[in-house]
Image (cartoon, rainbow, N blue to C red):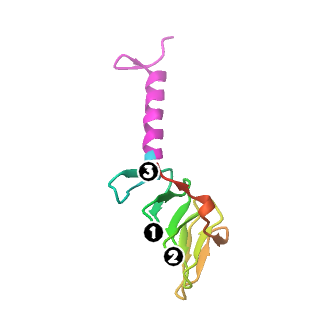
Amino acid sequence: MIGMRIEGIPMRLFTIVCSIILFSVVTQANADCINNPYGKRLCGKGPCEMDQYGKVFCAQPGGGAINDNDDNVRCGVGNCLKDDLGRVRCSKVQGGDASMDENGRVTCQGGCENGKMSLCEEAK
């Protein structure tokens, strides 16, 4: 039996091409790009922020990136927020959410940890 064809294209080839296109779209949706002070567009795998020197740093996919009170970029495994004291607090879970209550306290899915520069990578 001959396999299914769509307008002369074998179904297996059609499926592979569609999968590649879908993967490309999903990957780009998670990436973030920022123009540096010199107009160069820099991108990372996850959310990005610019520090006080104009360097762009990004979190890994599913992570968070946010500037601390000194304008240094801090990253987390999950999403990040600044608490009422200005500390960057991030979810310990990749893709985990962070939220702030009415008193300025940050709570995180899977628990919170301080954002770290070591979890950031410089954008290219």
Q: Amino acid at mark 2?
A: Asp
Which residue is painted at 51% across and 11% down in the image? Answer: 1
Which residue is painted at 55% across and 88% down in the image? Answer: 103
Horizontal arrangement in the rendering, residue 101 relative to residue 42 (left or right)? right
Q: Which residues are magenta?
A: 1-27
Q: Are marks 2 and 3 in contact (CB under 8 Å)?
A: no
Residue 2 belongs to the span the image colors magenta: yes
Horizontal arrangement in the rendering, residue 63 relative to residue 4 (left or right)? right
Dividing the picture into quarters, in which one does residue 117 lie? bottom right
Q: Which disc, if any, is residue 43?
A: 3
**What percent of the width, then of the height, locates residue 116?**
62, 66
Mark 3 is surrounded, within 10 Å at the Cα level, by few (under 14), some (14 to 19) or many (20 or more) other residues, namely: some
Q: Amino acid at mark 1?
A: Gln
* Residue at the disc numbered 1: 52
Give how far apart the Cα atoms at labels 2 and 1 are.
8 Å
Mark 1 is surrounded, within 10 Å at the Cα level, by few (under 14), some (14 to 19) or many (20 or more) other residues, namely: few
* Residue at the disc numbered 2: 70
Which residue is painted at 34% across and 19% down in the image? Answer: 7
